[in-house]
Image: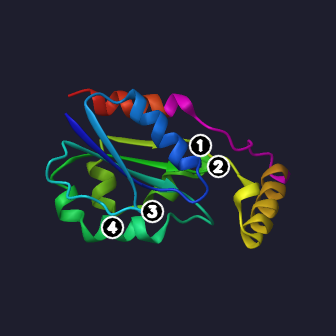
Amino acid sequence: MKTLIIYASTYGFTSDCVKECKKQLSGEVTSVDIMTDAVPPIDDADNIIIGGSIYMGQIQKKLKQYCISNLEALMKKRVALFLCCGLPENFDETLKAAFPEELIRKAEAKECLGGELRVDKMKLGHRMIAGFMQKETAKQGKSEMKKLPGNITKLADCMNSI
């Protein structure tokens, strides 16, 4: 079984989640950060896992555009979707904004892998926004961002099952 993970990582949290997922997947697994690498043809892949990080309610444009442009080919594959976002309670809404509706319906797994603010790697503007978001989240009594390793395992287990 061949699995291709197509993802977008801005500050490294998504990349770390992909590395963990790769360890748990069976067969040949290739991962590609669409922000820095060319996506290989998906013809040979049995499974396609697609995901990225959420900033200001949006996934990276390049990943979203890839899904739209390659929707017909993706619909012929076994697909899973994931998002790295700090507010799991907004996952369904954020998923709808990130991916085409047909792809969401087709996906066998849809998981929120959690989130982590890596402020030390952020540009000034993003640091300011992150600080504001942290204050608002605390004010609203919402949980702090954290990695959800159980959801990485659920995603891998689903894609390992045939």
Q: Residues within 10 Å of mark 3 (few under 14, many from 20)?
A: many
Rendered view: 55 above or below 143: below
* Image marks 4 and 2: residues in contact by CB distance under 8 Å: no
The residue carrying mark 3 is 98
Rendered view: 121 above or below 156: below
Image quarter in which the C terminus is found: top left
**Circle number at residue 86:** 2
The residue carrying mark 1 is 114
Q: Residues within 10 Å of mark 2 (few under 14, many from 20)?
A: many
**Residue 107 image offset from top left, x and y in percent:** 30, 47
Taking the spot 53% from the left edge, 49% from the top edge, the residue there is 14
Amino acid bearing label 1: Gly
**Residue 133 image offset from top left, x and y in percent:** 76, 60
Give the spatial CA distance, label 2 vs label 3. 15 Å
Front of the two marks 4 and 1: 4
Residue 18 in sight in this render: yes
Taking the spot 30% from the left edge, 34% from the top edge, the residue there is 159
Give the spatial CA distance, label 4 vs label 3. 11 Å
Give the spatial CA distance, label 2 vs label 1. 5 Å
**Circle number at residue 66:** 4
Q: Which portion, as a residue range, is magenta?
A: 139-151
Label 3 sits on a secondary structure element that is helix
Nearest the viewer among 34 and 98 is 34
Q: Residues within 10 Å of mark 1 (few under 14, many from 20)?
A: many
Indicate which disc, 4 or 1, sits on the residue closer to the N terminus. 4
Amino acid bearing label 4: Tyr
* Image marks 4 and 3: residues in contact by CB distance under 8 Å: no
Front of the two marks 4 and 2: 4
